[in-house]
Image (cartoon, coloured by chain):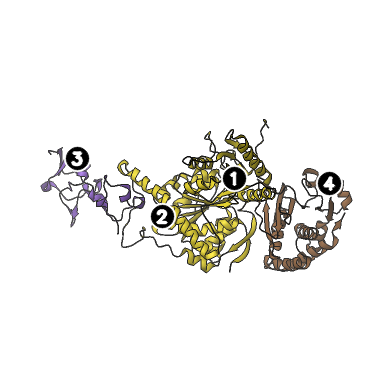
Amino acid sequence: MFRRAQDINEKSTWQELTPGAEIYEPATSLQVKTGDWRVMVPVFKEAQCKQCLLCVPFCPDNSIPVKDGRRLDFDFDHCKGCGICYKVCKFEAIDFVKEEK
Amino acid sequence: MKDDVVEIRWHGRGGQGAKTACLLLADVAFSSGKYVQGFPEYGPERMGAPITAYNRISDHVCNVHSNIYHPNFVVVVDETLLKSVDVTSGLKENGALIVNSSKDPEEVRKEVPGYQGKICCVDAEKISMETLGKNFPNTPMLAAAVKVSNVIERDQFIKDMKSSFQHKFRHKPQVIEGNMKALKKSMEEIKVS
Amino acid sequence: MAIRERLSGNEAVATAMRQIDPDVMGAFPITPSTEIPQYFSDFIANGKVHTEFIPVESEHSAMSTCMGASAAGARAVTATSSAGLAFMYELLWVSASMRLPITMAVVNRALTGPININNDHSDSMGARDSGWMQIYAETNQEVYDNFIQAVLIAEACRLPIMVCQDGFITSHGVSNIDLIEDEKVKAFVGEYEPENYLLKHDNPLAVGPYGVSPYYMEIKRAQAQAMKDAMPVIRDVANKFYDMTGRQYGFFEEYKMDDADVALVVIGSSAGTGKEAVDRLRSEGQKVGLIKLRVFRPFPRIPLAEAMCKVKAVAIMDKAEGFSNSGGPLFNEARNSLYDLPDKPYAVNYIYGLGGRDITVEDFYDIYRDLYVICENDDPGDVYRYVGVRDSRY
């Protein structure tokens, strides 16, 4: 029986941690919604996008999902609003605006 | 020290085999059923620097892990050390000083003023040259130490050394006979004051 | 039937390693532990073991190798001394925090400053707070027996362990030893089967994560618990070892303590020399005793305090200077352990044996005499003392 990452949080006691703080499952970073940190937000303008996919490798947070060779809208659970995608886009297919929360 | 422990101190120069002789003595004493210690004193040694090695040999486990300051026997593998090292320091008067030398014991005695105990001389260089054709003084000195200290019975020693040489020199069997001769010759030719 | 042999302490450890046949050894040579990987590589060359031997370019890499191997699920061993241990310093903390059960032979040698190759305990004592367990040996027999037990202790506790012996004194000293048959050792240590490891196909694992402040302290508290929990494990493994060999091991050995007036607490080979002093003084009618500490980490605080309380005065011997202005590391911990007890003995510290300075039976006489003086005067005097040092005042 492994303690799952989702069951460990900042309220967990020392007895509730795993030995050596090991993590027994992959991709646990998905559970941390870094999208909350965002002040600015990228806006995907699909009509102008040439699907060159240059923005995808530049995204430091893996927040531009790609399906069947085409990028989809942003993963806003994890996009931190850094704006790198907006800077590298050659086709003005990404806007970068203040987020209204 | 418990009375039955025989303590031996070896003086030699780096590269002459005093440490090897000390460990060989521990080996053969072990083979004859004894409890043994064989340990060299380590420092930043170079070829030719004076070195010291020690043996404790007993019928009981020996707990002491210090160096030996009051040996029963002292073996000097290189007689030039008599001038530079206080080889008889702490040597018990009922023990013996065993020196690799062509001189007579009484002549050697002049070089260790103050020491009243027994002195034994064996010309290990000559014996080694005669039997091995090279100067390896440690084999004759080992035999001399065994003969004088009597820590191992002679025939047992000869037997154990033969099997030890057969193992050690399994790739050079031609030197086994010479080494065995060197042992026996040393035990015969040793001069005791 | 035990196998009667004569081996140096380094040969004894290499032999234990051969019998254990670990999965990985990462090693870099340093005096006086060099012979351990040297003998072990002979075993590899001769097909006596199946170990992946990884010669590296530094001790930092040797420990990193062991950590990677251990995290991957391998039984990993290494050996080092002095500056080599110091060069592993960062990784000692990391490996303990990652709870990797690495077994390391430490052949104790003085740390440099000035450079020196001979024995004292400054290297391993300097790493005493790293989270590694530490077991010390008086003899070649003990270092061999300790190494075999250590593998099981480490794996059961999920903590790394140092198996320490005195450089040159036991590591290069040949003496009698009873070896255990290969198949018995193999059965004793068994196969290493960790529950989780990096190479486990059906269970992805991440090790060594960043520990942000909200977690770091809980992680350390859990690690401290592992060290506490090691006490019964060490005892159980010793019992299992006793069943196999008839040789008994505890956290410490009490030598003629039952009716003793005064006693020493000492670590390592010097305990043997101290025992000889005890025997001789007892033959002269003086009731003296000795406690030889085997397990320094975890520190056996309560049982050790109880043992020391049998006497009126104890001399706690440190083969390492802590530069703390309040005595060596063993003194501070042993004396601290007495604090809660109502009837405690006087406890004084002797720093001894630094950088290979020999300690003799006669030195121990002097210490026991000092202890009797303390009892007579009802005054410990200066508790922070040296033995075997040239001093213009005396």
The residue beneath circle 4 is B115
Q: Which numbered circle lies on residue C263? A: 1
Q: Residue at x 74, y 69 (%)?
A: B159
Query: Does dot 2 land on a helix, a strand or a loop?
Result: loop
| Separation of residues labelled 2 and 3 (CA atoms) | 41 Å
Question: From the image, which quarter does the C terminus of chain A lie in?
Answer: top left
Q: Amino acid at mark 4?
A: Tyr
Q: Which numbered circle lies on residue B39? A: none
| Separation of residues labelled 1 and 4 (CA atoms) | 39 Å
Q: Position of residue B134 (x, y in %)?
A: 77, 59
Q: Is residue A48 left or right of residue C15?
A: left
Q: Which sits in the foreground, C272 or B168?
A: C272
Q: Amino acid at mark 1?
A: Ala
| Separation of residues labelled 4 and 3 (CA atoms) | 92 Å
The residue beneath circle 2 is C158
Q: How many marks?
A: 4
The residue beneath circle 3 is A38
Give chain A's shade. Answer: purple
Label 3 Cα neighbours within 10 Å, binned few <14 / some 14-19 / many ≥20: some
Give chain C's shade. Answer: yellow
